[in-house]
Structures are given as C-alpha cells and as structure tokens.
Image (cartoon, rainbow, N blue to C red):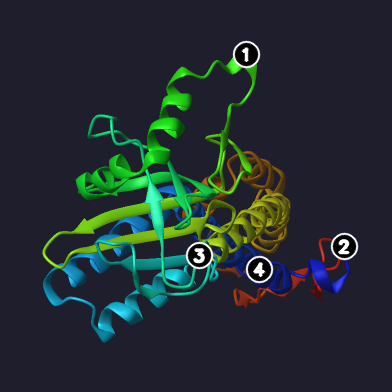
Amino acid sequence: MIQHSFFKLQNTKKMLIIIFSLIIVLSVSILITTEIIKSRPQNIQQSIADRFNKIKVQLEFKGFTKNVKEMTEDYSKLFDGYSNIIITDDNGKIVYKVNDGYISEKDKFLVLIDPWQANGFDSDTAYLIDSKNTIKYAAQLDIALNINKLKEQSSKNTLSKALFSQLLDSDDSLGEPEITNSDGSTYVISSETKIMMNYEYIASKGLNLYSLYDSEHQFNNYFIFTNFLQTVSHWMIIITVGFIILFWILLPLWVFKDAQNKHLNVHKWAILTFFLNVFGLGIYLIFRPKSAKYPSCNQDIQDNWILCPNCGKKIKV
C-alpha cells in the first residue's frame, strides 16, 4: 500500500480540484488571447481609418480647434510618435503639424501625385517635395479622398510631367529610372517606401489634411503586446496540456483509493476512469455508495481510514 502523504485520499482530491481549476482558467485565457491575436490586423487598419476620418470630420465642421489638436496628438501616439499630422492651406503653407517628421521646410509642405491617373485607385506613390522642386521622400498612399485639389496642384508643377511620364514609360529590365532635381541632384524613382500617407482635402475650409507614418512603427505598442500574447498563449497551451496529463493520471489513482475505501472493485473503476476520465468519474460517482460500514458495528468508515483485510483493525491512509 502506498503510504506517501501525497497519495493520501484527501490530498489527491485537493490536488485534482486545483489542477482542474487551473485547466479551466488556462483554457479560457487561451481562448481570449487567441481572439485578440486573430482580430489584430482588422483592428489596426480600422482604427487608422476611423481616427483619420474623425480628424477630417472635426476639421470639416469645426475648423482647426483645440479638440482637433488633441486628436492629432493622440493619433501620433498610436505609432509611438513615428507619425505626423500636417495641415496646410491651398498654397501648401503649414497651418499645423504634430512634429517635424517628413518636413523638409519650416513653413511649406508640398506633395505631388500623378494628376492623370483615374480616380478611385486603391494606392499609389506620392512624392514629397520642397519649394525648389527637389524630391525629398516617396510615400505610399493608403487613404486618398477628395484628391482633385491635390491633382490640380500636381498638374501645375513642371516636375510632374517628367516624373510621372518616366514612371509610365520605365522598363523594369533597364533598372530604376532617375530624375534630375532643380538643384542638379538626381533622384532614383522607386515605389518601394516605408512611409505611408493618408490624404483628404477639406474643401469647406480650404485645408489639406495629411497623415504620414513609418510602416515599421505602425501601432508598434499594439504589435508588441499581441506578439507577447502569442508567446504567452504558446506556453499556456504547453502548461495546460501538462496539467491535463497530470489530471488524467491522478484521477484514476483517486478513484482507485476511494473505491478501496468503499470496498468496491478497485481495478474495474480505476480502469474505467483511466480510459473515460471525467466521464468515467461521473459513472463511478453514480454507483459509488455514500459511505462504507464497519462489518462489526455497522458504523460509517471515515474517508481516511480503512479496515485491515487480515485483522479487521482500522488503518489510517
């Protein structure tokens, strides 16, 4: 007979309750973290679009207010500060900016897009230039609404014809084309960029609204958090499987000990519980008598005592 205190009936029962509770808690936690991780891409893109639209609506109806300023600062924080909201007038004069990111001049911010491309495109390359028509950055348009004003401004710029005609006529086999800036420097035209840009023209106020952010830092904190959740979820699954295996082993052991105390067929119930686990336990509890009796006095046998099969004395287990 096993005498170690760990294998005593009451101790095994307590351990089973603890392990089963941990399995339930871990399983629920895994389900929750899995749902959070699954929703990550949709949440990010939707949040970018929603927050940009809220800023646009505030500008449309209220103009540039303190509330707009707070909204733009909160928007930038979502990218760990690697984002800049820029508001300009019709002439490109900066009315407001969150920070100096992607700003090549203190008071001016100018953008060129293909003025001859049809409306309704999903994405395209925009070029950030200075007042001397020197290309500073290329950006990928993500959200581009009410862009006729931007197209009009681009069509008037002499750089547009040279820039976008080269894009249309370029042959990838000949390598990436170059364009000569007004200062004599050359710029290699490429659509590969990590800078993302959202744009809308607020016609009622004569304002251009730009949002620029580094795609590598897009919702960086959120990505860090969900990546951490992936690691945690992975280890929770491993720990849960370990607890399930331990529970699967301890449960038949408890049934074996309990059936022994009740003077039942220990091997039958232990084997049944080993193969069916909690279902086997349910069947056992249905047929298990509430208590066992001492044959000499017909008194209930306590759970932590059994009778010696040879002499009939009580033995503590």
Give how far apart the Cα atoms at labels 3 and 2 are: 78 Å
Give the labeled residue for mark 3. Answer: 103
Q: Residue at x 87, y 62 (%)?
A: 2
Give how far apart the Cα atoms at labels 1 and 2 are: 80 Å
Q: Residue at x 69, y 64 (%)?
A: 261
Q: Quadrant of residue 308?
A: bottom right
Location of residue 80 in the rendering, given as x and y in whole percent from the top left corner: 55, 69
N-term-proximal mark, 2 vs 4: 2
Q: Secondary structure at mark 2?
A: loop
Give how far apart the Cα atoms at labels 2 and 4 are: 16 Å
The answer to whether 65 is drawn above or below residue 143 in the figure is: below
Location of residue 239 in the rendering, given as x and y in whole percent from the top left corner: 70, 56
Give how far apart the Cα atoms at labels 4 and 3 are: 68 Å
Give how far apart the Cα atoms at labels 1 and 3 are: 34 Å
Q: Quadrant of residue 124?
A: top left
- The reply to whether discs 4 and 3 touch (Cβ–Cβ < 8 Å) is no
Is 188 or 142 nearer to us in this picture? 188
Give the labeled residue for mark 1. Answer: 173
Q: Secondary structure at mark 1?
A: helix
Q: Secondary structure at mark 4?
A: helix
Quadrant where the C terminus lies? bottom right
Mark 1 residue type: Ser
Residue 38 in sight from this viewpoint: yes
Crowding at dot 3, Cα within 10 Å, few <14 / some 14-19 / many 20+, comes out as: many
| Mark number displayed over residue 13 | 4
Give the labeled residue for mark 2. Answer: 2
N-term-proximal mark, 1 vs 2: 2
